[in-house]
Amino acid sequence: MKLNMAVNPAPEMKGIDAYIFAFKGWEILVIIEHEGCRIPKGSELEQAGLIGARLHYLGVLGTIPCYSVDLDPGVGVPDGFSFTGLRDLFGHVGEDLFSAAGHAFQIVHWDRMHQYCGKCGAPAEYASTERAKVCKRCKAIYYPKVSPAIIVAVKKGNMLLLARNKQRKHAFYSVLAGFVEPGETLEECVIREVREETGIEVKNIKYFASQSWPFPNALMVGFTADYGGGEIRVDHREIAAADWFGPDSLPPIPGSISIARKLIDAFVKEQKQTSKER
Ligand SMILES: [Zn+2]
């Protein structure tokens, strides 16, 4: 079941042990168990003497309420607990808990980034009726920010356009992606990103699926597109290498956490289907 999101009112907590998504910096607090880890409950945090600031009610997962907490940067690691990167949580907890953790991190991040008003510098406080922070002095309102980005699988016959990012530590190839500019439609962003990064023109842009990507607050909007012209010309600013790959000769690709992988998997499945039909 998915997190049923809510802002307030938080439910009666009597006798219910809530999930607490507690963050220190970019890392989430987990309880070590067997060979994996799990999300701690409120009573376990209390027992460990971990007091967090800025508690936010997120909604319920089934019948269990969920909260996000920002821990003091100086807090130690109590016995049985550990801090781990959000990405490393993938595979250790169910997909619903994983996406709830991503949601929690975005709320924590928003709260941290808006302790003070960006316009006049006065302290910001919580709005009473919605998830927002309001400047005490000038009343400017700050909502949690979501940054839309496109990600696109460009197909040419039975080949897929994949590129290796310059920044990434891991040398894998993936489909192209980039943030939407102000004033731009998603389709215009697809055309621009592919053109800028690889010199390729695209057509037949179709929506695929979307994914919240909490690093820290992107919304990845996935598309497929067909090759429309041009030769590969790598930009060398963001992209180190790009090429067309067939379904049986793929380079190292991202793990199953990402929509990038879902786009690549869908391409491979489609190609296998087509070659069977031939
Ligand atoms: Zn202000």
Image (cartoon, rainbow, N blue to C red):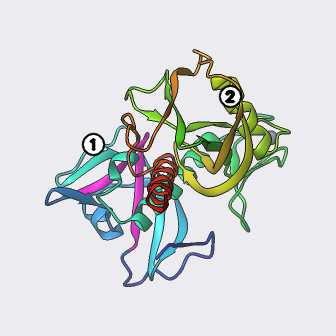
- Image-based side of 95 in relation to 190, left or right: left
* x and y, in percent, of residue 217 in the image: 59, 46
The answer to whether residue 54 shows anywhere in this view is: no
Residue 21 sits inside the magenta stretch: yes
> How dense is the environment of label 1, judged by Cα within 10 Å: few (below 14), some, or many (20 and up)?
few
Task: Give the residue at the far left of this rendering.
Answer: 34
Residue 110, above or below 19: above
- Image-based side of 186 in relation to 214, left or right: right
Label 2 and label 1: CA atoms lie apart by: 50 Å
Give, as a single range, the part of the protein colored magenta.
Answer: 18-31
Task: Give the residue at the far front of this rendering.
Answer: 278
Residue 74, above or below 110: above
Residue 92 sits inside the magenta stretch: no
Residue shown at the point (41%, 41%) measured from the top left? 254
Disc number for residue 200: 2
Residue shown at the point (35%, 68%) measured from the top left? 42
Task: Write down the residue under mark 1.
Answer: 76
Residue 38, above or below 189: below
> In which quarter of the view is residue 15 placed?
bottom left
Q: Is label 1 in a helix, a strand or a loop? A: loop
Q: Is label 2 in a helix, a strand or a loop? A: loop
Disc number for residue 89: none
For marks 2 and 1, the one nearer the N-term is: 1
